[in-house]
Image: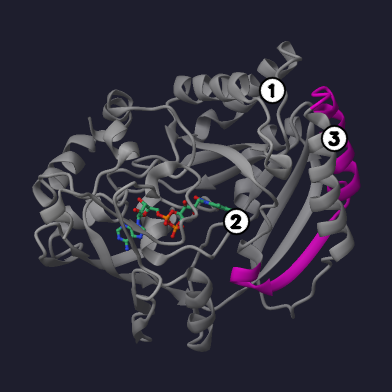
Amino acid sequence: MARQRGKRVKVVGGGHSPSDIACTDDFMIQMGKMNRILKVDKEKQQVTVEGGIFLSDLNVELSKHGLALANLGAVSEVAAAGVIGTGTHNTGIKHGILPTQVVALSLLTASGDVLECSESVNSDIFQAARLHLGCLGVVLTVTFQCVPQFHLHEVAFPSTLTEVLDHLEDHLKRSEYFRFLWFPHSENVSVIYQDPTNKPPSSSASWFWDYAVGYYLLEFLLWISTFVPSLVCWINRFFFWLLFSSRVENIAVSYKIFNYECRFKQHVQDWAIPIEKTKEALLELKAALENNPKMVAHYPVEVRFARGDGIWLSPCFQRDSCYMNIIMYRPYGKNVPRLNYWLTYEGIMKKYGGRPHWAKAHSCTRKDFEKMYPAFPKFCSVREKLDPTGMFLNTYLEKVFY
Ligand SMILES: Cc1cc2nc3c(=O)[nH]c(=O)nc-3n(C[C@H](O)[C@H](O)[C@H](O)COP(=O)(O)OP(=O)(O)OC[C@H]3O[C@@H](n4cnc5c(N)ncnc54)[C@H](O)[C@@H]3O)c2cc1C
């Protein structure tokens, strides 16, 4: 029908991408009903699912088979084909981004053919489709390599930016899933270690601190700060003192620890830079904020790590990486000026060889991607072969490919 009417098609999973990568004015295919588990191979510890299944459902089903995904992002209300559409990642220098867990997939192309793809079958298309941007066709099924089910022990404790940056190697060695939150306009850092454990589940979560204070009071105070921007520095310090200045521990099944509350509406940027540039880049961002008191930054700047991989359009292509996620909330939906902060951050990320997260804000175009990704021409040639008329493009993707 799309071909007859000269329309384009966009496939959507959870619709959770903050950028407009999953948007269209033409036809949209919502994959929510293609959500079955097709096969669990206990011997190989692999699961084959339909592309529309939410990871929240998959996590529960896998645990019934004693299996789990080795890593997950902050939310699981995202689809199997969606997370490999944008290169969703979490943290842990031994772990790659989520698409590295994919061992096979099947793709319905613009011509109506169904292609099975893996390292050994249609291997070029597989390398492209493991991070596909939604532009190669409809991802019908995905096979993930799983691991035996495990519990995680999370320990969060306060530190300083200087300490963490000076001992980054130690932190990366000490915890399998290490990340940290920096509170801009201060030295404050919350270090988060997550590691497999055999200890029984326990939780120090409290509705009052997590929601009444960490969500509702924060949103109200950030709204007030839209009239008095200088308050943001105080808010960052106050909330660190209230919520992050003592040691907190939780133990639960892995996916309950990987997933966390992302609070209310927000704008985000999340670039991956070579891991060895972490310190220089963060200190430069800190200095830029200190030198420009009118430029305010909400907490946290979330710093995560990922192993390098060989996926053509992965921000971690051929290098271990540090992802640095910056955030500006929109309290009660109100936009907070962020242009200066956004441009300063982007400038620093570009200077250190950064590559933007495909699902989040960035101002890059084809020229930038050609420089950033050595395999960009290979991806373009697979895309042009599979979709010569651009059936699966949209405005976002036109900026990437034209
Ligand atoms: C609260 C929140 C927290 C987040 N946390 C993280 C995080 O921790 N780490 C991180 O990396 N990202 C994070 N993200 C971003 C998110 O993980 C990605 O945007 C992810 O791609 C969303 O999956 P989705 O199913 O919603 O995909 P969608 O947004 O629906 O789609 C993403 C892309 O995949 C394509 N697509 C989807 N399904 C198919 C299909 N079946 N066939 C072909 N193409 C398809 C779409 O066309 C689009 O191009 C977060 C987002 C939010 C809103």
- Residue 177's tag is 2
In the rendered image, residue 123 lying in the magenta stretch gets the answer: no
Task: In this rendered view, identify the residue nearer to me: 369 or 171.
Answer: 369
Drawn side of residue 19 relative to residue 375, left or right: right
Q: Which residue is mark 3?
A: 235
What is the secondary structure assignment of the residue under circle 2? loop
> In terms of image quarters, where does ligand 1 lie?
bottom left
| Above/below status of 122 relative to 358 | below
Residue 162 image-quadrant placement = top right
- The Cα atoms of the two marked residues, 3 and 1, are separated by 17 Å
Q: Position of residue 34 (x, y in %)?
A: 35, 75
Q: Which residue is mark 1?
A: 286
Residue bounds of the magenta highlight: 227-256
Drawn side of residue 259 relative to residue 307, left or right: right
Q: Amino acid at mark 3?
A: Ile
Q: Position of residue 318 (x, y in %)?
A: 34, 41
